[in-house]
Image: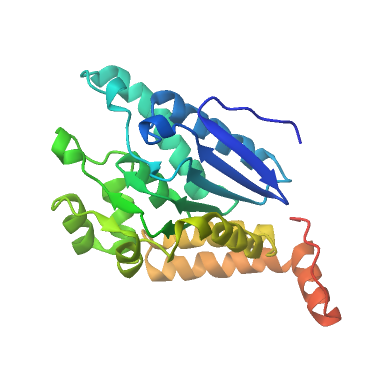
Amino acid sequence: MSEKVFENFLLEIEDGIAVFTVNKPQVHNAFSDDCWRELREFMEWVEENDEIKAVIITGAGQKAFVSGADVNKFAKPRTAEYGIKQRDLDYALRMIETGSKPVIAAVNGYAFGGGCEIALACDIRLCSENAQFGLPETKLGIIPGAGGTQRLSRIVGVGRAKEIILGGRILKGQEAVDAGLAMKCVPQEQLLDEAKALANVMIQRAPLAMAVVKRLILSSATTDIETGLRAEALALMVLMGTEDRQEGVTAFKEKRKPDFKGR
């Protein structure tokens, strides 16, 4: 696999799992436009690399996952320019959400604004005991404009989403689990190991089936039950004809680990 170097992130790849770490601890991993561009480029690169089976996104240091936008580069009104920059942001998050590979957010501290919205786009959120999730944009005269108003309500429900956004509520680690925002809360020193263990479970599954499941679950939020069930049945029919399905059944009968090829 060709090496990929990023200015604002660290990349570690081991056994098919890519750990992508926001590396700006001096500003609590606050995001600039360049960060959004690199996140988009990374997710495009992941989609094209068959050796990468799963992704973990986390933040450097002990205080922050992503603390939001870099306000030093966000202070001036720039309506037209921001519309152009928004494309990197939107596309990066949609790649996380709709890409074929599972993405885990290992939230190790502040996840405010865009940081919370990155976590919301991920398939699964794990958090440390010092994690804090919040969408405080209305205090700045704006809104959570990277999917916060849409994804949060689908994950925790409309009432809780209003409480968090309108009421300025900050959810700490275990509170996020209780609200359904995160899957599990662990001590900070265990967070990355926990994320890697989960990723290792995921990459043992058939990649085509995992990709299809991601799409079906995502579409279920905006699809009526009859349409969703038809899509599920059609997807199953397609998967029944794959080499991976045959390998999975054969491996089960032979009591061995399957060797999926994504075909």
Instruction: Tell whether 80 sits left or right of 20.
Output: left
Residue 131 drawn at (x, y percent): 36, 54
Q: Residue at x 38, y 60 (%)?
A: 129
Q: Quadrant of residue 208?
A: bottom right
In the displayed image of the protein, which residue is found farthest to the right? 254
Question: Relative to 56, is 137 above or below?
Answer: above
34 vs 143: above or below: above
Question: Does residue 218 appear to the left or right of 41 in the view shown?
Answer: left
Q: Residue at x 37, y 24 (%)?
A: 85
As drawn, 8 above or below 66: above
Quarter holding residue 228? bottom left
- Circle count: 0
Q: Is residue 143 left or right of residue 7?
A: left
Look at the image and name its color scheme: rainbow
Given residues 163 and 212, the one toward you in this image is 163
At a point 74% along the width and 68% down the height, the residue shown is: 245
Q: In the image shown, does 30 or 54 lie closer to the viewer?
A: 30
**On the rendered image, what quadrant is the N terminus found in?**
top right
Tell me the quarter of the image containing the C terminus: bottom right
The one of 174 and 212 positioned closer to us in this rendering = 174
Task: Give the image location of residue 99, x and y in percent.
Answer: 55, 47
Measuring from the top left, give residue 115's x and y in whole percent: 37, 42
Image location (x, y in percent) of residue 121? 42, 49
Which of the two residues, 225 or 245, is positioned nearer the viewer here? 245
Question: At 71% from the left edge and 31% from the top edge, which residue is drawn?
Answer: 3
